[in-house]
Amino acid sequence: MAETARNIGGVSLVGSGSATPKQRLTNDEIGLRVDTSDDWIRTRTGIASRHVVGLGESLTHLSANAGQAALDMAGWSLESVDLVLLATSTPDDLFGSAPKVQAKLGLSNAVAFDLTAACSGFLFALVTAGQFLRTRAMNRVLVIGADHLTRWVDWDDRRSCVLFGDGAGAVALEATSYEQDGLLDFCLKSDGSRGDCLTLSQVDSFNSLVNEKNFQTGGFLPVEMNGQEVYKFAVREVPAILQELLSVNKISADSLDWLLLHQANQRILDAVADRFSIPHRKVLSNLAEYGNTSAATIPLMLDEAVRKGLVKPGHLIASSGFGAGLSWGAALMRWQGPA
């Protein structure tokens, strides 16, 4: 974080919310469709179930519910919200879903837009929101991370269909003094040269238009992932970026109250904790219940931990998001919402 930003103002994390689809799909149920088993999935990923958007639900619906819960916890009036920032790679409308969420919530004074950074999306959106608040361009921002990846999964590919679920999580942020800053520091990175390891690519299909001219057909292929390469990337880069952040801020790993990572694979969570000698009891994880919900994993887990009384006011959290792009980042946060 630039020194000039430090001297302007702080960011306070004062509310959280989450929402997941009603449909819960277990490993045994997936085994009825593809050649897999509960034991095979659990031992390799730590996932036992995931929630899948069904009839009457949508990404917009989940995002609005998560956002409302965060607004309620923060105790904000609707007219006081300046910005709705929706981190998603799977909007209901390619032109953006944030304005529809804004309308559903009745936030008539707020501007709304989408931000796309796949599984790193929430962390990137959190940092983006922080810049508006530090400069006092805005006073209150609702950041939502939400994805509906199950509509882009190949349900006959047993390697990938077991990994993903749908969900939404939200955090209410407001401007505060530098002395009360809850977004202590951050570091964000991207490496497009490795982007083909995890993709949701456009259909490469062209059709005849007129006079031997063609047009490309709209649509997307299912999620494709080189699991081994993504795993190696995560266990190498996540500890490195966290170490960089801790070192710059002269914070020791044992002073952290919680480690909050993107929920992609339990082995990754365990490996990062072991790298810093952080007890596994300090590693927040709900991967077993929800699987990988992409941009929703971090705020979904945060909200669950807050509502269970695990994360308390003043707790110091090191968080890291990583995924497609390839993109990754880390942030040091201090929770300041209600107990």
Image (cartoon, rainbow, N blue to C red):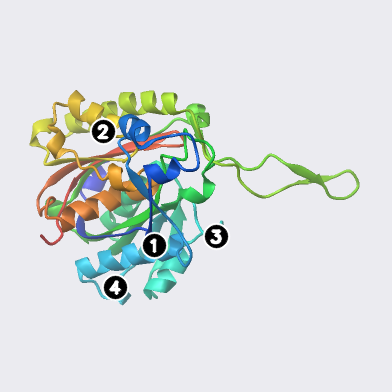
Which one is earlier in the sequence, the residue at label 1 or at label 3?
1
Q: Amino acid at mark 3?
A: Asp
Out of 240 and 156, give the one closest to the viewer. Answer: 156
Residue drawn at the location 44% of the way across and 43% of the way down:
30
Out of 37 and 261, give the one closest to the viewer. Answer: 37
Bin the neighbour count of mark 1 within 10 Å (Cα to Cα): few under 14, some 14-19, many 20 and up.
many
The location of residue 34, given as percent across then percent down, is 50, 38
Bin the neighbour count of mark 4 within 10 Å (Cα to Cα): few under 14, some 14-19, many 20 and up.
some
Q: Which residue is mark 1?
A: 62
Q: Which residue is mark 3?
A: 93
Res 170 → quadrant:
bottom left
Residue drawn at the location 38% of the way across and 42% of the way down:
27
Q: Amino acid at mark 4?
A: Ser
Q: Secondary structure at mark 4?
A: helix
Q: Secondary structure at mark 2?
A: helix
Q: Which residue is mark 2?
A: 269
Q: Check residue 80 in the rendering and tell me which mark sits there, or answer none.
A: 4
Which one is earlier in the sequence, the residue at label 3 or at label 2?
3
Q: Is residue 329 visible?
A: yes
